[in-house]
Image: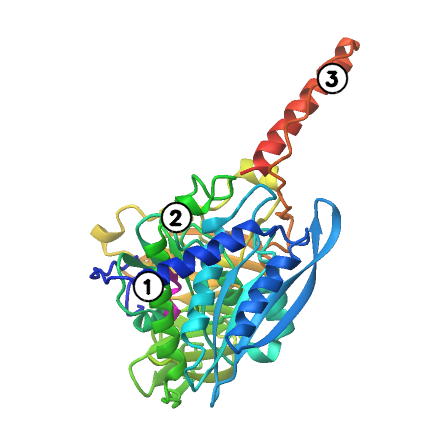
């Protein structure tokens, strides 16, 4: 069992007064940014220049990296802007925010001029401090069209990926009255670095929002997302303007992130936790760490999250196992194991069991399969959910199997981060040593947005097509009407 349930943890915090000049400075930056065009690849250069100029003014080394993007006007190019402060020692802390907007009519004040403004304020606050770890401030482009900027940056800097201790992503941080810090259970140690700040709320697990931080998760890099509770009413519309923002909320975000980066980057504790472990003959993975810390398992490229020693058993065959332990300063102990589990004739979980007694809520029905094809096509983040009526009363244990890898005593909603490819999830309800329920499903995982769910730049100025008025024979008219209705439906679905 994991040490903590992966459910939201609410932390009650006291309010701290925010300085008026911080609020003014943020409001000024947000005002400047919302005046720039920021649709990726469509005249967004001046906005990038402005951000680069600010980071340069604070003394950071600037890197600008251009990448291709599809625009409504055809192939285009956009760029990420990075400001770097070299630390005295090893490790890098990333603070990032996307500067692009959803469409040409979107001022994008909350989404995400606010995040960029907070990032620049943090850069300003830390400009004269000497830190042990390096800090990278990154303004990503292409977030709204499929997290392209973060994908490009992480692909380009493969050797830096191992170096990154933690990433803090800021996306929509100035509307509403509360900030939420979201992360995966294996990265919850990062929450210890968040100073107490007004109106904040920690969420462990997958929230509603996607964002650049999920690219970091895809590469198994610790990351948190900070976001407000302003909701979707104004976001991605022409009404996402500076007048609708809560600047003191953004100012408290600046304080929190500055404190967080200071804690993570200034530390002179660089001792990694020691990890020891092995795989038993029967495939059970066992490990121990030198200090209390958060540990998680990556097996055959899939991150299984925090699971206890002995809780996971490998099926027969060759496997690669990585055990990672984090301490509170973000130091990482890593143990790599090669396992070759002999075939002892142990039954595969699915052999002889028919679905029933326990079910996978997101499994496709026969009808869905006809409609969508044979497989689910999902993002790397899969919640191992199950539905087992009467589980508590009967003392039933649930075992989950991911590609045959058994998790004994699976918790409802446990999240895995898959490697791309085909995967299989099976769930077995076990009572008094006997399988009393079983269900299974198979799915194909791609990297986020590298799949048929392709993203487009959504031009919010596009209106519904008008229906032709010239007289036509009945059948073609019906066809045109049907096609127009489909087109209208399509346009509405694109505008969401
Ligand atoms: Zn955003």
Task: Give the magenta part as a residue range.
Answer: 181-187
Q: Is mark 2 within 8 Å of ligand 1?
A: no
Front residue of this view, candidates 456 and 119 = 119
Which numbered marker is on residue 163? none
Q: Is residue 382 visible?
A: no
Percent of width and height locating residue 339: 51, 81
* Residue 460 within the magenta-colored segment of the rendering: no
Q: Which residue position is annotated with label 1?
A: 409
Front residue of this view, candidates 33 and 256 = 33
Q: How many marks?
A: 3
Percent of width and height locating residue 271: 38, 90
Q: Is residue 176 visible?
A: yes
* Residue 182 within the magenta-colored segment of the rendering: yes
Q: Is mark 1 within 8 Å of ligand 1?
A: no
Q: Which residue position is annotated with label 2?
A: 245
Which numbered marker is on residue 468? 3
Instruction: Measure the C-alpha gap from mark 2 to mark 3.
Output: 43 Å
């Amino acid at each position: 069992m994991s040490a903590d349930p992966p459910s939201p943890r609410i932390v009650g915090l006291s309010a701290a007064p925010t300085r008026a000049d911080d609020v003014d400075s943020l409001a000024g930056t947000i005002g400047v940014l919302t005046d720039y065009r920021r649709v990726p690849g469509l005249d967004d250069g001046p906005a990038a220049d402005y951000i680069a100029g600010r980071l340069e003014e604070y003394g950071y080394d600037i890197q600008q990296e251009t990448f291709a993007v599809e625009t409504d006007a055809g192939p285009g190019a956009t760029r990420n802007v990075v400001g770097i402060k070299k630390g005295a020692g090893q490790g890098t802390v990333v603070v990032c925010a996307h500067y692009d907007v959803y469409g040409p009519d979107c001022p994008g004040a909350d989404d995400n001029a606010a995040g960029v403004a907070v990032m620049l304020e943090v850069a300003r606050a830390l400009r004269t401090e000497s830190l042990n770890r390096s800090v990278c401030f990154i303004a990503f482009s292409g977030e709204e069209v499929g997290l392209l900027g973060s994908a490009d940056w992480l692909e380009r800097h493969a050797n830096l990926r191992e170096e990154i201790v933690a990433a803090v992503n800021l996306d929509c941080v100035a509307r509403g009255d509360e900030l939420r810090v979201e992360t995966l259970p294996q990265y919850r140690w990062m929450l210890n670095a968040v100073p107490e700040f007004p109106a904040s709320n920690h969420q462990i697990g997958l929230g509603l929002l996607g964002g650049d931080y999920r690219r970091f998760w895809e590469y198994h890099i610790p990351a948190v997302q900070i976001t407000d509770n302003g909701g979707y009413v104004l976001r991605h519309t022409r009404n996402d303007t500076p007048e609708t923002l809560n600047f003191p909320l953004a100012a408290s975000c600046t304080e929190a992130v500055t404190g967080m980066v200071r804690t993570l980057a200034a530390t002179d504790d660089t001792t990694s936790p020691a990890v020891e472990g092995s795989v038993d003959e029967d495939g059970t993975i066992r490990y121990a760490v030198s200090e209390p810390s958060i540990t998680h398992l990556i097996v055959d490229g899939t991150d299984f999250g925090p699971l206890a020693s002995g809780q996971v058993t490998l099926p027969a065959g060759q496997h690669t196992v990585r055990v990672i332990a984090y301490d509170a300063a973000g130091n990482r102990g890593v143990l790599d194991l090669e396992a070759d589990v002999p075939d002892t004739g142990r039954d595969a979980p699915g052999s002889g069991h028919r679905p029933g007694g326990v079910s996978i809520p997101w499994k496709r029905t026969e009808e869905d399969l006809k409609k969508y094809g044979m497989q689910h096509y999902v993002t790397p983040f899969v919640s191992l959910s199950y539905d087992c009526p009467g589980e508590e009363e009967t003392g039933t244990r649930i075992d989950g199997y991911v590609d045959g890898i058994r998790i004994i005593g699976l918790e409802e909603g446990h999240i895995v981060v898959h490697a791309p490819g085909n995967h299989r999830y099976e769930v077995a309800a076990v009572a008094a040593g006997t399988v009393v329920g079983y269900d299974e499903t198979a799915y194909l995982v791609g990297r986020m947005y590298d799949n048929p769910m392709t993203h487009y730049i959504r031009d919010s100025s596009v209106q519904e097509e008008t229906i032709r008025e010239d007289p036509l024979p009945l059948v073609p008219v019906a066809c045109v009407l049907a096609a127009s209705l489909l087109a209208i439906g399509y346009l509405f679905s694109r505008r969401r």
